[in-house]
Amino acid sequence: SKIFYGGCSVNIAYALCRLGMKAMPVLRVGGDYESNGFKKFLEEGNVPQDGITQIAEEATSVCYLLQDNNNDHITIFYPGAMDGRYAQKMKDSLFETAKLGVITVASRPDNEEFFAKCKKHHVPVVFGMKDDFDAFPEPFLKQLLTESKIIFTNEVECEIIEKLFFGSCFVQSTIRIVHRCVPLVEKETHTNLVRSEICQCLTDGNEVLKRL
C-alpha cells in the first residue's frame, strides 16, 4: 500500500511553505520517522522541523480515512508517538515569534499545553474541532470556542457546538464558525488512505488572516 503523508496541520504547514510563507508543525514522531519517508517529505516541502520531537521506541502515528453516506470522514487512528503519555512541555522559543497558532486534534495534554503557550505569548488561535471529546472535554472546548480567533468545522461538528452551547451569548455574538471549508492543501499532499497524524501548527500568518 502507498503512504500519503499529511494530516491537518502538516498539510497547512506544507502548503504555506510551498507558497513561500513560514509555517512549522509541532508534533512528535516515532523511530521510523526517516525510514517511512516522512522526514524526506517535510524536507522536500521546506517545512521547518524545529518543532518535531522524536520518540525512538514508538512508531509515527497513522490513520485510515473512511467516508460515510453523508460525505463525512471517519478516522481510524493509531496515535503512536502522539499518544498523550508522551506529552511534554513545549519550548517557549517556538511561540515567541509566531503570529498564528492552529489547533486541530491531538491528545488533551498536548492541546492544553499548546493553547496555554499561545495565550502566554499572545498568539491568536485558529481552532479546527474534530468531534473528539477526549481531546476536547466540554469545559476546554468552551474555552477554545470563546478564545479562538477563527473556528473551522464540518456540518456535524457545527451541529454539536450548537447543541452544546446554542443560546449562550458567546455563540451568537463572539464566534464566527467557518464550515465546509476547502483546506489549503495541494493535491499530492491530500490524504486518501493512510497518513501521519499531527499535533499543531505555528505560522507567521498575518497574510492568511488578511485573506480570511
Image (cartoon, rainbow, N blue to C red):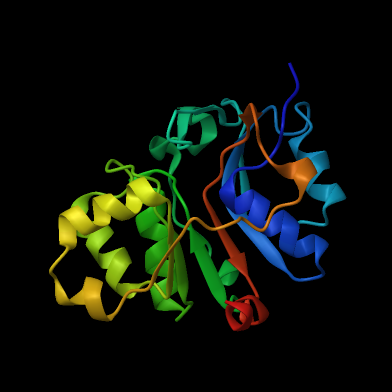
| Residue 95 location, quadrant | bottom right
Give the answer, above or below, for where 155 lies relative to 70: below
Say which of 137 and 156 sits in front.
156
Give the answer, above or below, for where 163 lies relative to 76: below
Looking at the image, which residue sits at the far front? 69
- Provide residue 187's location: percent of width, then percent of height: 77, 45
Looking at the image, which residue sits at the far top? 1
Query: How many callouts does the rendering have?
Result: 0
Say which of 67 and 19 sits in front.
67
Say which of 147 and 162 sits in front.
162
Mark yes or no: residue 28 visible.
Answer: yes
| Residue 134 location, quadrant | top left
- Provide residue 192's location: percent of width, then percent of height: 65, 31
Q: Residue at x 66, y 58 (%)?
A: 184
Mark yes or no: residue 50 visible.
Answer: no
- Provide residue 195's location: percent of width, then percent of height: 63, 33
Q: Residue at x 42, y 51 (%)?
A: 154
Q: Quadrant of the C terminus?
A: bottom right
Looking at the image, which residue sits at the far right? 44
Give the answer, above or below, for where 82 lies relative to 124: above
Looking at the image, residue 112 sits to the left or right of residue 181; the answer is: left
Q: Residue at x 74, y 37 (%)?
A: 38
Q: Residue at x 83, y 57 (%)?
A: 46
Q: Quadrant of the N terminus?
A: top right
Looking at the image, residue 154 sits to the left or right of residue 181; the answer is: left
Looking at the image, residue 112 sits to the left or right of residue 1; the answer is: left
- Provide residue 103's location: percent of width, then percent of height: 47, 58
Looking at the image, residue 54 sits to the left or right of residue 119; the answer is: right
